[in-house]
Amino acid sequence: RAYTITLIPGDGIGQEVVPAAERLLRETGLPLEMHYAEAGWDTFQKVGKSVPDETLERVKASDATLAGAFTSPSGSQKVPGFQGAIRYLRRTLDLFANLRPTKSRPIPGSMKNVDMLMVRENTQGLYVEQERRYGDVAIADCVITKGASERIAKVALKEAQRRRRKLAVIHKANVLPLTTGLFLETALEAAKAFPEVETYDIIVDAAAMKLVRDPQSFDVLVTTNLFGDILSDLMAGLVGGLGLAPSANIGERTAIFEPVHGSAPDIAGKGVANPAATFLTAAMMLDYLGEAATAKRIDRAVDTVLEEGPRTADLGGKADTEEFTDAVIEAFRSL
Amino acid sequence: RAYTITLIPGDGIGQEVVPAAERLLRETGLPLEMHYAEAGWDTFQKVGKSVPDETLERVKASDATLAGAFTSPSGSQKVPGFQGAIRYLRRTLDLFANLRPTKSRPIPGSMKNVDMLMVRENTQGLYVEQERRYGDVAIADCVITKGASERIAKVALKEAQRRRRKLAVIHKANVLPLTTGLFLETALEAAKAFPEVETYDIIVDAAAMKLVRDPQSFDVLVTTNLFGDILSDLMAGLVGGLGLAPSANIGERTAIFEPVHGSAPDIAGKGVANPAATFLTAAMMLDYLGEAATAKRIDRAVDTVLEEGPRTADLGGKADTEEFTDAVIEAFRSL
Ligand SMILES: CC(C)[C@H](C(=O)O)[C@@H](O)C(=O)O
Ligand SMILES: CC(C)[C@H](C(=O)O)[C@@H](O)C(=O)O
């Protein structure tokens, strides 16, 4: 049977990189039934919701969704009724696992021999967004449960099994023994069922330093929501920035894939955005659907073009979105 | 009159690096009245308190304190009655400003032209350590007040005035508008009284990436407690790790200076620890006391020896603590 895929271009350059990815996906010859849907800031302004019900239903009914980029303009947290599309989708669909691979790429500014995967818990911690203000004092809840810690640890352990079998559990249990301590204990407990995975723990500040000094020593990392947010951006920085960073938001029933970069309003509409991160994200989606061989082929095709050119402007080249896409499709065919 | 200084070697290599710093401090010829005091894990095991009252009184009555290192053995958060010495001191003495400079050093692994200063709020956020557990759910409070945000912002703005006049306010107001949003607003408001400082804001994940990719673009950074903890370790990683990272915990009435590194139990007692971070920390202390010229001279003396040798084992050399100290004193004399 065909895979049902929802494509949500979203805001800004999302409108350019998602159609580019659609072209590449069609090229795979896989049975993909792709439909477009709307979400994001523009959608909010038109219909008063960043994710219309129709889109939500489509995403729920799909095997997977590929999203482009969602704007949350600065100050938008104060617009009544507005909630960022990706956060809304993560929460509503309980997309509890945020996977962010970081791999060396043949571009300037990328460290060599880095190949690691951040598995970020995607529903809890400070992202429960429970805040209160009493006069000049504001308090936010940071919530950790055993159940959510266990399920994310299992995802990380399974990913480690498919990779180099090393798992770093990142926490701050020395200062927060009940919350991140619960996360740590639960992850170490879950690891007992995976004796072939070498599981160790590391305090978040030490992890930040070690990622900078010795990223090659990491394979899979698992941590709570906000630590994962910060460290995965740090990791992307090591291999040249967000321009090439893919990500997945995975739940029990469906998953949403999105490049980590934003909507880049400064270059939106000009046809010059770099679709490489979206291609790598599409590859993650195919891997999730069980099409690992095609996923790898896309990954290699992107690397080939990054190495041999043409490159887009963000990487010092002159190609526009279409020329870069043509080149990747060409490379994909010849692999 | 003389400056009253308390020296707290603490645990592990603290017992070696603080006496080395004392030698260097004596060499300055400044009127320093130095007294030793006890604190740390060893002290806790002897007297049941990580900071005995006598030490607390000494620190309170001193112009400044230089601490070596404090162990918090893993699992120690579960030892009844134990609280890490530095956290206890920060809280009890309301040492609200944690200053962590990061500067390129002439050692392998240090990026060039980096010169920035993290100003970390040191009393609030998740470090209020208010946690609860209900069955399988744990909750920690993250507390931000306007007052504490304002006073730390002012410290950062004043530091920026003395430096290159750029201040990055780091936050996550897009997800936490009430708490880190309050911090952000308050800092931007405080900045209005410092029009000569270019103040801008940056979201914590973006800051983590930018620190990796373009650390030279930063001058002063100010942020909430845990973000400051994570990012300052990242920053230290860029210039070769914790081996050379100094820090200050500053309150209204006194201040405690400590190298960021730990007690290094593996090499403690062997006389081979690198005292460079403690020397740079002592320099920060002198600067705080108003002895900027001598502070700079120590900083330069350390750089001279790092460049020309001898180096300690952690930097690939063969010098022990005493030889390195001799060399720095020698360099200090000839500057
Ligand atoms: C846009 C923002 C809410 C989001 C987050 O903090 O999770 C982003 O930084 C990310 O990492 O996907
Ligand atoms: C030891 C620990 C409590 C401390 C902290 O988290 O503040 C340390 O990491 C630091 O940065 O001084």
Image (tube, coloured by chain):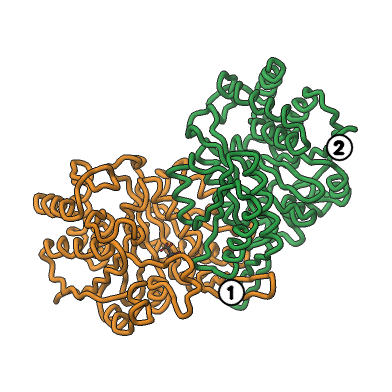
Chain colours: A green, B orange
Number of numbered discs overlaid on the protein picture? 2
Looking at this view, is B163 or B58 the one in front? B58
Point 29% across, 80% down: residue = B55
Chain for disc number 2: A
User: Callout 1: 10 Å neighbours few (<14), some, many (20+)?
Assistant: some
Q: Is residue B33 left or right of residue A275?
A: left
Residue located farthest toward the top when viewing the structure as drawn: A334
Looking at this view, is A114 or B82 the one in front? B82
Whole-percent x, y for residue B332 in the image: 13, 53
Point 65% across, 65% down: residue = A144
Point 50% across, 70% down: residue = B127
User: Callout 2: 10 Å neighbours few (<14), some, many (20+)?
Assistant: some
Q: Please tell me in which quadrant of the rendered image residue B196 appears.
A: bottom left
Whole-percent x, y for residue B119 in the image: 41, 61
Tell which quarter ligand 2 is in. bottom left
Question: Judging from the image, what secondary structure is the residue with disc 2 in?
Answer: strand
Q: Is residue B139 visible?
A: yes
Point 18% across, 45% down: residue = B310
Whole-percent x, y for residue B86 in the image: 38, 71
Question: Judging from the image, what secondary structure is the residue with disc 1 in?
Answer: strand
Which residue in the structure is indicated by mark 1?
A: B131
Q: Please tell me in which quadrant of the rendered image residue A236 appears.
A: top right
Which residue in the structure is indicated by mark 2?
A: A4
Quarter of the figure with the N terminus of chain B: bottom left
Mark 1 Cβ inside 8 Å of ligand 2? no
Give the amino acid at mark 2.
Thr
